[in-house]
Image (spheres, grey):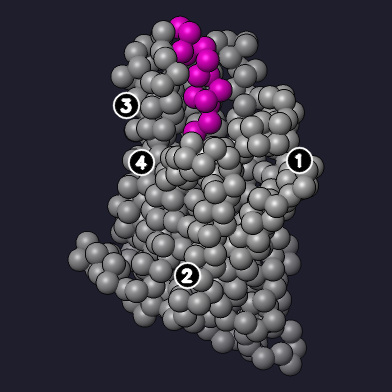
Amino acid sequence: MIQEETMSSVPPGGTLLARGAAAGPAALVRPRGRNLRWAIIGVICLLTIANYMDRGNLSVAAPLVMKDLGVSNTMMGVVLSAFVWPYAIMNLPAGWLVDRFGAKLLLACAAGAWSLVSMATGLATSIGQFLGLRVALGISEAPLFPGALKATNAWFPDQEKAAATSVYIATTQVGLAVAPPIATALMVAFGWPAMFVIIGLFGFVAMLGWLAIYHDPAAHPRISAAELAYVRAGQSGRTAAPDGGAAVGLPEWSGLFRQPAIWTMIVGGFCLQYTFWFYITWLPTYLQRAQHFTLSHAGYLSALPFIAGAAGVLAGGRVSDALVARGMAPFHARRAVVATGALLTAATMIATTLSPNAVVAVGLLTTGMFTYSLSSGCYWTLATDVLTTPRFVASVGSIQNFGGFLGGACAPIGTGLLVDRFGSFTAALLVTAALALVSAAMYGLLLRRRMAL
């Protein structure tokens, strides 16, 4: 076990603390030269892009698949939704597996599995095969973010951790953005079966990069003494454990559900992610029906909130880390950003119901995605800071995300029911705003203490 260190002298290979400064996050000086920890974030970004391209490629190929296989719209909707529920449920064991066996092994296995599933989808010849493969994709992709969170917690000091997390969370927007044009170009050139195979091969490339570059910080053959000392000294209030060395048993893992903080985070995650999935599933329809944009204009305008969202993810991570650098405890810095983002999002949703015209409505919804996204990186980083030790980092992150994806699964259904019942999107927007307020209360008011595990 690597214990927290307070260092006042010059470590081998570089200066850690400014002369005369007290040890602590604000006093840390970044080592000069190569910073290996950011190369690891780069590989996680490649894995994330591959992951999201595999999630999105079927929606692009759906019209051709439906034509070739004679599939109805309703059945294709069932196939497209088959990813969500197994993904949500598998977040629970995925976090435990990452804590038990380590981020390196689990992410490599997951990337290999989801890449194989993507390639096999190109060979599917029946709707039953497509349905089974989408379920398999949801299962295989579940370890990505718990594993990335575990790796980030090991490799980054507290005052950089949220910014590092926000980089690969923002990359999810890149994956969603690049999947349609890349998949379309590949289908035009080679057909939809080959498209699935080629995108699957990209996942294997990302997996090989991960295996080549990732090791524990203390065991990495290319880390400098200065960077290792910088990382260690910046991990205040926690100790690092070797990857896969936590030996977390199922009885210990199940004990997490006796912690009030866990249930606070599950409820908070449910309400927060409901907002995001409202955007993903209903925004184009809202713009067409409620604001009377044409189909093509609604498609273009639907991109604006996600562009703003990518900026919001990065901004939220930077703000949180700046608060830590100024002396705020990491746990409270993450809570503050998540709660503030949720509160501001609720305000924009309410304002959208009162917007006088379509332009204002689009501006408010774009602002709402930006404010929601302020919380995204901190939402994950909070799972590392709510604990006093890193043994359960991946487990806590995946349990919170389980709650989040339950909210994501309910958002499309709940919105549709409300629109059918009331004949407009007003009630749906108000419910989304109310859930955002609940999320702000969960993280800002009820989640007050860290878990001593």
Residue 396 percent location from the top left of the image: 39, 63
Name the residue: 50% across, 64% down: 439
Q: Is residue 50 left or right of residue 115?
A: right
Is residue 67 magenta-colored?
Answer: yes
Residue type at mark 1?
Answer: Ala
Per the model, the C-alpha gap separating discs 4 and 1 is 34 Å
The amino acid on which the numbered mark 4 sits, given as a three-letter code, is Trp
39 in relation to 225, above or below: above
Front-lying residue, 146 or 373: 373
What secondary structure is marked by label 1? helix
Q: Is residue 224 visible?
A: no
Residue 20's x, y, as percent? 74, 92
Query: Label 3: which residue?
Result: 132
Closer to the camera in the image, 377 or 299: 299
Q: Are marks 2 and 3 in contact (CB under 8 Å)?
A: no
Q: Which mark is residue 123?
A: none
Q: Look at label 2 and name its amino acid.
A: Met
Q: Which residue is mark 4?
A: 85
Disc 2 or 4, which lies upstream in sequence? 4
Point 59% across, 47% down: residue: 426
Specify the label residue 358 is tagged with. 1
Q: Is residue 445 visible?
A: yes
Specify few, some or many for label 3: CA neighbours under 10 Å numbering under 14, 14-19, or 20 or more: some
Image quarter hosting the C terminus: bottom left
Is residue 205 inside the magenta stretch? no
